[in-house]
Amino acid sequence: EAGVAQSPRYKIIEKRQSVAFWCNPISGHATLYWYQQILGQGPKLLIQFQNNGVVDDSQLPKDRFSAERLKGVDSTLKIQPAKLEDSAVYLCASNNRGTGNTIYFGEGSWLTVV
Amino acid sequence: SQKIEQNSEALNIQEGKTATLTCNYTNYSPAYLQWYRQDPGRGPVFLLLIRENEKEKRKERLKVTFDTTLKQSLFHITASQPADSATYLCALANTGNQFYFGTGTSLTVIP
């Protein structure tokens, strides 16, 4: 079974530029998460989708971050404009109640804002 | 909002000893608690889950305890090996499958 796929793996941009990350969850997983992990810290939930609807986006900085999950499969997380403090790993994860309560993570997209 | 804290200092132990990691939380009543392992440059990987009505869970050399009165979980690795060196994360989850992670504890097992 293929895991959670993310791209790009690494990205370096200048502040005030924009960036987009893509995630393809495990096939059949209805729930998709985006987490932000700053170096030395635990993952912080940014947004949770159930199919193509948003369940929780309370910690998403909506003035600069946006996410969508069209058709309830792939998802894109966008940052515009980026700030230096956005430098982090952006982890996508997916889950399906039918497979229990485990969430499966991708390898992450590493963002450096200079 | 919920606060989840793990051992603030990195943990170094001798091979063969038992490693004990702590996860404390406040302002939350999770339906269950999970432990994940994260290697450098990789995403977290699920290890164990324990529900609010369970006191202890075991899986091979791993043991998790959950005290909802103390709001604390302990994660034990017995007969530790250098390959166990990694960062370990605890995560709290509610019935809506929203997962909130702790700060993580870095474990190094010294040969």
Image (tube, coloured by chain):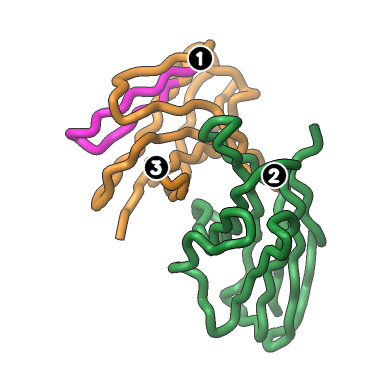
Chain colours: A green, B orange
Residue B20 appears at what percent x and percent y? Answer: 39, 26
Q: Chain of mark 1?
A: B
Q: Quadrant of the C terminus of chain B?
A: top right
Q: Gap between marks 3 and 2, in whole Å?
A: 27 Å
SS for tag 2? Answer: loop
Question: Do marks 1 and 2 share a chain?
Answer: yes
Residue B31 appears at what percent x and percent y? Answer: 34, 37
Residue that mark 3 sits on: B95
- From this viewpoint, is residue A43 visible? yes
A44 vs B27, left or right, is: right
Residue that mark 1 sits on: B59
Q: Disc 1 or 3, which lies upstream in sequence?
A: 1
The residue that appears at 45% across and 34% down in the rendered structure is B34
Q: Gap between marks 1 and 3, in whole Å?
A: 23 Å
Badge 3: few (under 14), some or many (20 or more) residues near its Cα, within 10 Å? few
Tell us which disc is closer to us: 3 or 2: 3
Against B56, is A20 above or below?
Answer: below
Query: In the picture, residue B71 is in which quadrant?
Result: top left
Pointers 1 and 2 in contact (C-beta within 8 Å): no
SS for tag 3? Answer: loop
Residue A14 appears at what percent x and percent y? Answer: 74, 83
The residue that appears at 51% across and 39% down in the rendered structure is B106
Q: Gap between marks 1 and 2, in whole Å?
A: 22 Å
SS for tag 1? Answer: strand
